Amino acid sequence: MLLMKRNAHFSSVDDMRLPELHIEVRQRSLHINGGGLSARNALGVGSPKSPSDSSHGEDTARAKRARTTASSIVVSISEDLICSISHELMVDPVCTLDGITYERKEIETWFQENDTSPETNLRLGAKTLIPNISVKKTIAKLLASGKLEKKVREDWEERKRGIDLVRAQKLFNEGKVEEAAELGHPEAQGNMAGRCHYGHHGQAQDDVKSLYWAKKAAAGGDRQGQFRLGWSYFHALGGLPENNALAVEWFTKAAEQGCHIAMNSIGFAYEGGGHGVTKNLKTAVSWFQRSAGQGDMAGQFYLGVCYYNGKGVAKSLEMARFWYQKLADHDYDGNTFRARAQRELGTMIMKGEGGEQDPAEAVSLWKKAAEKGDEQAQGHLDKLKTFSFEISNIENPPAPKNDTPLTLTCLFVILCAVLAGVFFEKKALEKKLDGAGHEPI
């Protein structure tokens, strides 16, 4: 049982000429390893010289008295490291107004129902708590010395992690992401990995720092950290060698937690193969299907690419058009994959691939994609203009005259179909999937 005396008198410290006062825990209280330094040595108290060693002729009795005095000081001071409420080595020591130190969590719990001192039972003027920096530093030195029994040290470390995570969650909720990450909050660490990768939220772009946070977040089970660590292996970032096998391993952990971008990344790893992964287009498609089925816009686009080109799945223009249409109809405009789907769907509709041909609808889709910054869609529109046709005429063709042998509507349809076949090569869809874009969302 840990002792809890609180009446230590330090008047004899100067007489002992201690070079520095280190508060220590007695061996029998916190199991300081018997084979290591004694409590006296840990305190920096030198053993009195024996008569044979003394140049001043100290006798045995005096040496014994010195050792006894030093031992009593160690016993008295060591108790200040133990919380009298929890009977444990303190993690976050704080002082009340009467100068007594407790574990913060324990005294805060006490103050929820009491306004007195747990030790004296006297009423306190206020419930103010002041961090005891001196005791905290002493405990840190004790832990760093390696003299505590493993079980005691591990118990202290576990309690510290719990305390840190409570504080970290509060900081994270307040938007103090980096501070929360420093205290070990996995989600905050994952956010920091992303911020450092992209150079967002006041962070400089730094792949080494991104990897640092990704490793910590991944170890804590955060899916963003797991994805970022996999991405670093996939693209040899932050000093890591390219290793697709390890990348897939971490991507899979993130995907199991619902990370869509990790699902797509696994698809790319199997589509390209190499660096520890055997190329397998069917497996690649299965991951795109999984992502697309959960509503991911990138997954839907890549699945459309696979169906159009017949990669890893039977070629089906109808299915390609289905997935492009599903993505084009999405009500979220802030995603580049929607613009790419609108452009590709427009080209398919212009050529009548996988469904009806509708030049007006095709041009409308190109315009929507171009408005979102899609350069290829804008290129399609620019080529139409070179033939001096007004886009508005295609979208709203004039009514045909009865005496016109070939109506304008038919002329427009035929001409546009020809132009589509000549000028609108589907380069992005004829390239390998790795050329379709491997960047994360």
Image (cartoon, helix red, strand yellow):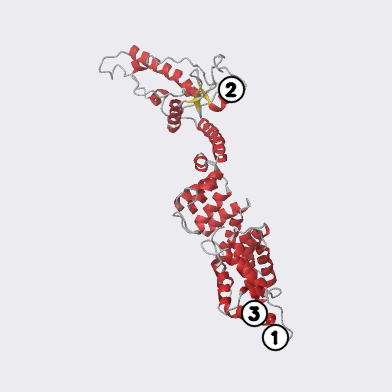
Q: Are marks 1 and 2 in contact (CB under 8 Å)?
A: no
Front label number (1 vs 2): 1
Tell me which amino acid carries mark 1: Leu
385 to 22, vertically: above or below = below
Q: Residue 172: where, in percent of width, then height? A: 55, 40
Name the residue beneath numbered marker 2: 111
Q: Residue 251: where, in percent of width, then height? A: 57, 55
Residue 16 occupies quadrant = top left
Q: Of callouts 3 and 1, which one flags the residue occurring earlier in the amino acid sequence?
A: 1
128 to 253, vertically: above or below = above
Q: Inspect this view and state whether residue 284 appears.
A: no
Tell me which amino acid carries mark 3: Ala
Tell me which amino acid carries mark 2: Phe
Front label number (2 vs 3): 3
Name the residue beneath numbered marker 1: 406
Q: Of callouts 1 and 2, which one flags the residue occurring earlier in the amino acid sequence?
A: 2
Q: Residue furthest top?
A: 61
Q: Residues within 10 Å of mark 3 (few under 14, many from 20)?
A: some
Residue 69 occupies quadrant = top left
